[in-house]
Image: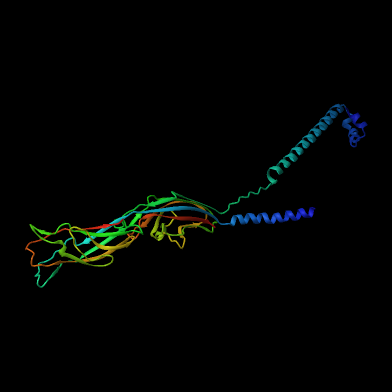
C-alpha cells in the first residue's frame, strides 16, 4: 500500500501529509517506508498494550481468587459428661486370724482402681463407696465400720466403710482426667466375731457432674 | 403448607440445640462393686497369770484352809458359732506329791470372780468345769482364788501338782 492509496481512503491528516514539500521530492519513497514502519510500530504497540491489559486483568482476577475470596467452615464437637470406673479384682477376702496376734487383718489383695472422668473445667467429679449393711453370715454380723482402707495415687483417699453414709474415696480437682490408684483394705479383728463366712458388697459410684 | 414447614423448621432450630446443650449438662455416673469376704474360724486362747501358786505352811488349828499366795487372773478368748458354747475345764490327774507322800488334790478348791467363771474343786479322775459360757464368741476375764484344806494329817514336805486348764471352742 502506497501513499496514494492511503490518500484515496480520504482519512484525515493524510492530505496534509501529502502536501508536505518533502513528500513531493525524490525522497517520497523513503517517507512512505517510514510511514509504514510507523504504522507497523503503532500496531505492535497496540497489540502489546492489549496483551498487557489482558494479562493484568487476568492477574487481578487470579489475585482476587487467591487473597480476597473467603469461605468459612464451622466445626462443632460435643463433649458430654462421662464417667467410667473399673476396679480389679472385684472381690477381696480376709483370712481367719487370731485377734491376739493380728489385731487387724490385711485383705488377700490390693484393689486397683481406674477412674475416667469428663466434666466441666469448673466442676469436679466425685467417687463414693456405699455399703448397705454389715458383713453377714446367717444372722451373725461383723460391723462394716471395722473395714477401712488406705489409698495410693492421686486423687484417691483413705477411709472407713459406713453403712449409713457413703464415704468419699477420692478428692478430685476440677475438670476432666484419667486417674489410677490402689486401695488396700484392712479389717479390725475381734474375739467377739462368731465363726462363719461373712460377706458384704460395696458399691463405688463415680459421678461426673 | 410452606407456613407449616417454616414453623416446623423453626421449632427444630430451637429444640435440637436445646437437646444438645442438655445432653452435655447431664451428670454421668459409673459404678463398680467390690465384694468383701471374711472368714472367721473357731479359735480359743486362754491365759493364766501367774502360772504358779503356793500354799504356805499354816496351823490347821488356826487356818482350816490356807489361801494361795496369789489369785490367778484368767483370760479366755473364744470364737465359736452363735449357737454353740465354749467350755473351760481343769484336769488334775495327780495329787499333790512330795516323794512318797501325798495330799489329795481334791483338798484344793477355788472361788471365781468375773463371768462366766465358776468355783470348783479339783478332781483327779474327772476334769472339772471352771466356766459356764453363753453361746457365741467373746473375750472373758476373771480371777480364781485357790484354797487348800489344811490338815494335821499332812506329812511335812514340799508338795507339787500340776493342773491343766483347757478352753474349747466348738
Residue A158 can be seen, yes or no: no
Q: Residue furthest front?
A: B125
Q: Relative to residue A81, is residue A33 drawn left or right?
A: right
Q: Residue furthest left?
A: B156
Q: Relative to residue A61, is residue A32 drawn left or right?
A: right
| Of the pair B134 and A75, the residue shown nearer to us | B134
Residue B144 at x, y percent in the picture:
21, 65
| Of the pair A39 and B6, the residue shown nearer to us | B6
Image point (87%, 31%), residue name: A22
| Of the pair B101 and A54, the residue shown nearer to us | B101
Identify the image quadrant of the C terminus of chain B.
bottom left
| Of the pair A99 and B161, the residue shown nearer to us | B161
Q: Residue furthest bottom?
A: B62
Residue A114 at x, y percent in the picture:
47, 50
The answer to which quarter of the image holds residue B100 is bottom left
The answer to which quarter of the image holds residue B163 is bottom left
In the depicted structure, whether residue A33 falls above or below residue B85: above
Residue B108 can be seen, yes or no: yes
Q: What number of labels is visible?
A: 0
In the depicted structure, whether residue A61 falls above or below residue A83: above
Residue A165 at x, y percent in the picture:
46, 62
Residue B90 at x, y percent in the picture:
22, 59
Q: Relative to residue A182, is residue B80 drawn left or right?
A: left
Amino acid at each position: 500500500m502506497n501513499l496514494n492509496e492511503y490518500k484515496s481512503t480520504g482519512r484525515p491528516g493524510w492530505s496534509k501529509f501529502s502536501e508536505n514539500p518533502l513528500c513531493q521530492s525524490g525522497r517520497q519513497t523513503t517517507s512512505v517506508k517510514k510511514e509504514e514502519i510507523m504504522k507497523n510500530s503503532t500496531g505492535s504497540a497496540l497489540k502489546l498494550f492489549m496483551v498487557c491489559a489482558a494479562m493484568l486483568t487476568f492477574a487481578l482476577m487470579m489475585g482476587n481468587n487467591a487473597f480476597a475470596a473467603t469461605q468459612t467452615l464451622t466445626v462443632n464437637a460435643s463433649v458430654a459428661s462421662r464417667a467410667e470406673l473399673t476396679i480389679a479384682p472385684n472381690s477381696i477376702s480376709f483370712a481367719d486370724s487370731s485377734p491376739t496376734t493380728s489385731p487387724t487383718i490385711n485383705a488377700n489383695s490390693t484393689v486397683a482402681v481406674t477412674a475416667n472422668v469428663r466434666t466441666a473445667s469448673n466442676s469436679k467429679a466425685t467417687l463414693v463407696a456405699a455399703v448397705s449393711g454389715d458383713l453377714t453370715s446367717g444372722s451373725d454380723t461383723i460391723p462394716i465400720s471395722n473395714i477401712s482402707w488406705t489409698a495410693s495415687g492421686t486423687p484417691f483417699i483413705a477411709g472407713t466403710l459406713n453403712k449409713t453414709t457413703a464415704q468419699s474415696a477420692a478428692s478430685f480437682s476440677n475438670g476432666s482426667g484419667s486417674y489410677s490408684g490402689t486401695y488396700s483394705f484392712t479389717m479390725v479383728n475381734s474375739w467377739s466375731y462368731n465363726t462363719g463366712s461373712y460377706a458384704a458388697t460395696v458399691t463405688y459410684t463415680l459421678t461426673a457432674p | 403448607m410452606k407456613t407449616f414447614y417454616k414453623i416446623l423448621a423453626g421449632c427444630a432450630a430451637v429444640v435440637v440445640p436445646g437437646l444438645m446443650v442438655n445432653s452435655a449438662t447431664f451428670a454421668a455416673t459409673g459404678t463398680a462393686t467390690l465384694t468383701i469376704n471374711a472368714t472367721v474360724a473357731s479359735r480359743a486362747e486362754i491365759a493364766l497369770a501367774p502360772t504358779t501358786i503356793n500354799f504356805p505352811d499354816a496351823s490347821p488349828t488356826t487356818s482350816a484352809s490356807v489361801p494361795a499366795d496369789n489369785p490367778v487372773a484368767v483370760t479366755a478368748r473364744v470364737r465359736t458359732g452363735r449357737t454353740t458354747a465354749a467350755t473351760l475345764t481343769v484336769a488334775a490327774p495327780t495329787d499333790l506329791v512330795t516323794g512318797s507322800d501325798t495330799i489329795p488334790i481334791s483338798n484344793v478348791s477355788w472361788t471365781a470372780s468375773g463371768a462366766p467363771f465358776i468355783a470348783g474343786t479339783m478332781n483327779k479322775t474327772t476334769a472339772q468345769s471352771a466356766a459356764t459360757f453363753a453361746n457365741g464368741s467373746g473375750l472373758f476375764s476373771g480371777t480364781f482364788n485357790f484354797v487348800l484344806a489344811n490338815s494335821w494329817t499332812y506329812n511335812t514336805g514340799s508338795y507339787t501338782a500340776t493342773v491343766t486348764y483347757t478352753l474349747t471352742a466348738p
